[in-house]
Image (tube, helix red, strand yellow):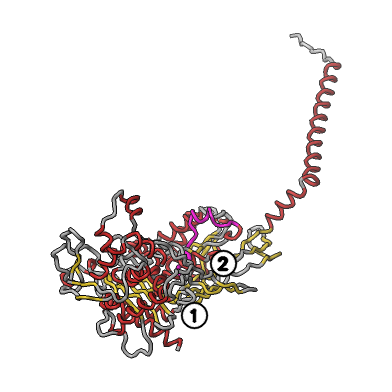
Amino acid sequence: MSRIYTIKDNLVENRLFLNRIAAAFITILLLTSGLVIRLIYLQIVGHEHYATLAKENSIKIEPLEPTRGIIYDRHGKILAENLPSYSLELIPEQISNMDDTLRRLQNLLAIPNEKIEQYHKQRIRQKRFTSTPLLISMSDEEVAKFAVVRPYFPGVDIHARLVRHYPYKDLASHVVGYVGRINEAELKTLPIAEYRGANHVGKIGIEGFYETELHGKAGYAEIETNVQARAINILNEVDTEPGANLYLTLDIDLQKTAYDALDTFNGAVVAIEIKTGGVLVFASRPGFDPNPFVVGITNNDYQALQASDNQPLYNRALRGLYPPGSSIKPFIALAGLEYNVISVQHRLFCPGYYQLPNASHRYRDWKKGGHGAVSLTEAITQSCDVYFYTLASMLGIDRIHSFLQQFGFGEKSGIDLVGERSGLLPSREWKRNQRNQSWYPGETVITGIGQGFLQISPLQLARATATLANKGNVVTPFLVDKIVRMNSIAPGPESHGKTIPLNPVNANNIIQGMINVVHSARGTAKGISKDIPYQIAGKTGTAQVFNIKQDAKYNEKDIEFKLRDHALFISFAPADDPKIAVAVIVENGGHGGSVAAPIAGKVIRQFLGDKK
């Protein structure tokens, strides 16, 4: 068998070999060039950028939350403070399995599902590297339980924080307010730099209105960390600026007197220092304990507050609107004098009812047999309805609206709180715009005794009373007396207002009638004048909650409690040199003289006793 031999072409093989060597050389050259270029870029061109990244891997910028300012009353008693507390906080970036971690923590510390849900809502609003609290105000037992198993929970740790605390609880809840966790809407409006690392913000009351002053200025710390992202050294720290301390005009002892005097009734008491406009009492009962809102109130507890028939979350002093009843009569009487519709000596006859010309409807007086012929002073003293029915008709709604508006009815007072309501001062224009109806004479009649469409807040009533005591000098009520920062003291809001051009003689005549309400034998509030060395000027009021038919008789004992009349009382003292004005509204209290007036009497006695 013959063999086949292949003849090699050495020239072709050498050329192929050389081509492969050249290709490999070019590839190596290109790769080397790329590596050199990359090294040049990393070392020279991109040095600053990558050096920064490397630094950030070893240095963490941690925001420092400023200490919130303290809130004091006028005597330096603490109304809102910061107490040290431990919180359980998680950093999502350092936790590989969040669900498993939360499940184990829940089993360990018996954390309710609501707290877990709250944490999830809070976590999605924060950066992954931010420490977010799961539990606030941990008990010693909870701290001890977690400390034992701390190594098994990477990214979870216990932090010492200051937690807001309100020592007077429901007593000052509506006026002081509270802080709560920052929600999604607030996160969009709050300055990021100042609230990075913060979890709480003022919600209502002074806490909400003065949030900027109370919060302070945030700082930060540059912290060197190891490969496990644990802090090993603080490289630099920019200090925080603590929030300002606020000193209120509020007297918490006087507030307690007013709140306790309301007893089992719902209602409100507002007292104003007449010369300055500083609010001494701003009580709304019932109140609520604001402390659970700080740490995260449970859904069941919150729903219970909202569902309560007593509405403890409702700020009656600021937002409650009521018919003023007979407490409006001094202002109607003053309007009659100022417009020269009546004189002090002019007498009107009260047969126990009033009728408009050519009308059959009778507007009844509270006294069935009537008061007979009464003067203006006697009408105020005895609260004669027929006198004011007649006077209101003589004045007309246009002049009533114009005059009452000067005293602040139907508008916000400008107090340093959020959420004030303006009430309702009716007029022809209002009814035409809101109801597309004409104004009727009968509506003017009942406006004269504080019924009908007229709606006022306790704050408005107190302000109007202070203006009357001031004989026309209007003050703007305010709560913050001074704002104390680290290096400065600033006054609170200015209490400036207009002056109503009143005839002093007319004002004195009205005040004399109000003095008689308290100090004369026929006065409707004579029960509070015993054993006081000064005179109180006041006016009782009883406001209907529902309309009574023409021939029906009002019997308080036969009527459901929630349908009983509201009791009101306005007052100021001493009458000859006014220092304090008080407005009291007791829901379903019945009679102003027997229920509301004693509350104002207690507040006045305590305040003037302290002054003396």
- Label 2 or label 1, whichever comes before in sequence order: 1
Point out the stretch of residues depicted in magenta: 176-192
Residue nearest the viewer, comparing 437 with 411: 437
Residue nearest the viewer, comparing 161 with 467: 467
What is the crowding at mark 1: few (fewer than 14 residues within 10 Å), some, or many (at least 20)?
some
Q: Position of residue 254 (x, y in %)?
A: 41, 80
Let me know if residue 286 appears in the view.
no
Let me know if residue 41 appears in the view.
yes
Residue nearest the viewer, comparing 507 with 226: 507
The residue furthest top is: 2
Report the residue marked by disc 1: 77
Disc 1 marks a residue whose amino acid type is Lys
Report the residue marked by disc 2: 213
Q: Secondary structure at mark 1?
A: loop
Location of residue 7 by image quarter: top right
Q: Residue at x 26, y 59 (%)?
A: 443
What is the crowding at mark 2: few (fewer than 14 residues within 10 Å), some, or many (at least 20)?
some
Does residue 328 appear to the left or right of 166 in the view shown?
Answer: left
The C terminus, quarter of image: bottom left
The N terminus, quarter of image: top right
Location of residue 601 by image quarter: bottom left
Disc 2 marks a residue whose amino acid type is Glu
What whole-number distance in Å separates the C-alpha atoms at marks 2 and 1?
19 Å
The residue furthest left is: 551
Q: Position of residue 439 (x, y in %)?
A: 29, 54
Q: Residue at x 15, y 74 (%)?
A: 369
